[in-house]
Amino acid sequence: MKKSIHPKYMDCKVHCGCGETWQTRSTVPEIKIEICSACHPYFKGGGAKYIDTLGRVDRFTKKFGSDYFAKPEKKKTAKTTRG
């Protein structure tokens, strides 16, 4: 490995816009971010919330039916014996 071409890996302090801070390691001493897992709505609200845009799900179910994603039943075939 060549010397003096790799950046120095050091302790880094991360600052979020909501006031949350934590320590990690990086090639820069300080990182400022706008949003983190403490203030992001996905992590705050208990998971993802699906938003139906313009009724697309309703239109899909009307077109293809509500059982479109149901698993098809396996057909039972009679075994034949060779004689």
Image (cartoon, rainbow, N blue to C red):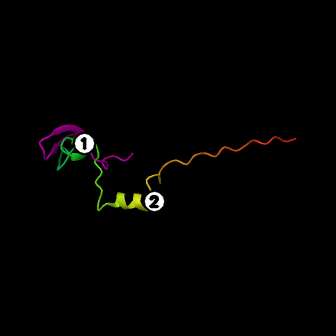
| Residue occupying the far right of the picture | 83
Residue 51 lies left or right of residue 81; in this view the side is: left
Asked if the magenta segment contains residue 21, the reply would be yes
Give the Cα distance between marks 2 and 1: 33 Å
Image quadrant where one finds the C terminus? top right
Question: Residue visible at 26% across and 44% down?
Answer: 8
Q: x and y percent of residue 68 in the render?
A: 47, 54
Mark 1 or mark 2, which is nearer the start of the sequence?
A: 1
**SS label for mark 1:** helix
Q: In which quarter of the image is residue 27?
A: top left
* Label 2: how many Cα within 10 Å (few below 14, some 14–19, many 20+): few
Q: x and y percent of residue 34 in the render?
A: 17, 50
- What mark, if any, has residue 63 been given in the picture? none
Asked if the magenta segment contains residue 75, the reply would be no
- What mark, if any, has residue 43 been given in the picture? 1
Residue 53 lies left or right of residue 75; in this view the side is: left
Question: Residue visible at 29% across and 60% down?
Answer: 53
Q: Which amino acid does label 1 sit on?
A: Phe
Q: What residue type is labelled 2?
A: Phe
Q: Give the range drawn in magenta.
A: 1-25
Q: Nearer the viewer, residue 51 or 15?
A: 51
* Label 1: how many Cα within 10 Å (few below 14, some 14–19, many 20+): few
Q: In which quarter of the image is residue 29?
A: top left
Of badges 2 and 1, the one in the foreground is 2
* Residue occupied by mark 2: 64
**SS label for mark 2:** helix
Q: In which quarter of the image is residue 76?
A: top right
Q: x and y percent of residue 9 in the render?
A: 27, 42
